[in-house]
Image (cartoon, helix red, strand yellow):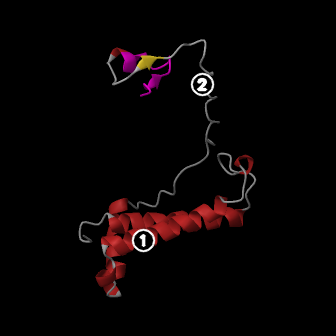
Amino acid sequence: MSSKRIPEWQPEAVAEGAPGAVAEDPTSSMPPPPPPPPRPSDFTFTDNGGSLEALRRDLSAFARERNWDQFHTPRNLLLAMVGEVGELSEIFQWRGDGACTPGLPDWTDQDKTHLGEEMADVLCYMVRLGDPGQG
């Protein structure tokens, strides 16, 4: 049985008696990875007065007007969301880490728009899945 190794920068886990926790030998550990690059400071979400609750109401009304509630079972919503996550993943699939740095500076406006559309699709299914009226 192997014991859980706790890095030296987490001594509280050893002190708190985490099951199987053993302080790591500082001479044998690798240095911690560098911190991620800072996020672009000019980024903000669009502030149009919307909220997740407003989005939930709009999505619910949209589905109700089309008589889609009968199809929006938790299972179906989850499977549809997984499909959208797949489409989102495709955008990144063959781009290396260097092309996916914070802010995506090397991406075209068209690429960023497509990314935003797929992220919105995932969000809509997530909100719809979390709607208390859908389960």
Q: Nearer the viewer, residue 62 or 96?
A: 96
Image vertical order of residue 25 relative to residue 2, above or below: above
Is 39 on the left or on the right of 110, as rendered?
A: left
- Tell me if mark 1 has few (under 14), some (14-19) or many (20+) residues whose alpha carbon lies within 10 angstroms of its own: few
**Dot 1: what SS?**
helix
- Name which residue type carries label 1: Leu
Kindly identify the residue that appears in the image at 63 percent across and 21 percent down. 31
**Dot 2: what SS?**
loop
Spatial separation of the CA atoms under disc 2 and disc 1: 38 Å
Q: Quadrant of residue 94?
A: bottom right
In this view, the residue farthest toward the bottom is 66
Image vertical order of residue 50 relative to residue 98, above or below: below
Q: Quadrant of residue 19?
A: top left
Residue bounds of the magenta highlight: 1-14
What residue would you read off at disc 1?
A: 79
What residue would you read off at disc 2?
A: 32
Check the picture and name the quadrant holding the C terminus.
bottom left
Q: Nearer the viewer, residue 124 or 83?
A: 83
Q: Quadrant of residue 60?
A: bottom left
Question: Reading the chain from its start, which is encountered first: label 2 or label 1?
Answer: 2
Image vertical order of residue 100 relative to residue 50, above or below: above
> Residue 72 magenta-drawn?
no
Q: Residue 7: x, y in percent?
A: 50, 21
Q: Residue 30: x, y in percent?
A: 62, 22
Q: Residue 23: x, y in percent?
A: 45, 15
**Observer able to see residue 121:** no
Is 118 on the left or on the right of 49, as rendered?
A: right
Q: Nearer the viewer, residue 59 or 25?
A: 25
- Name which residue type carries label 2: Pro
Badge 2 vs badge 1, beta-carbon distance below 8 Å:
no
Kindly identify the residue that appears in the image at 53 percent across and 63 percent down. 119
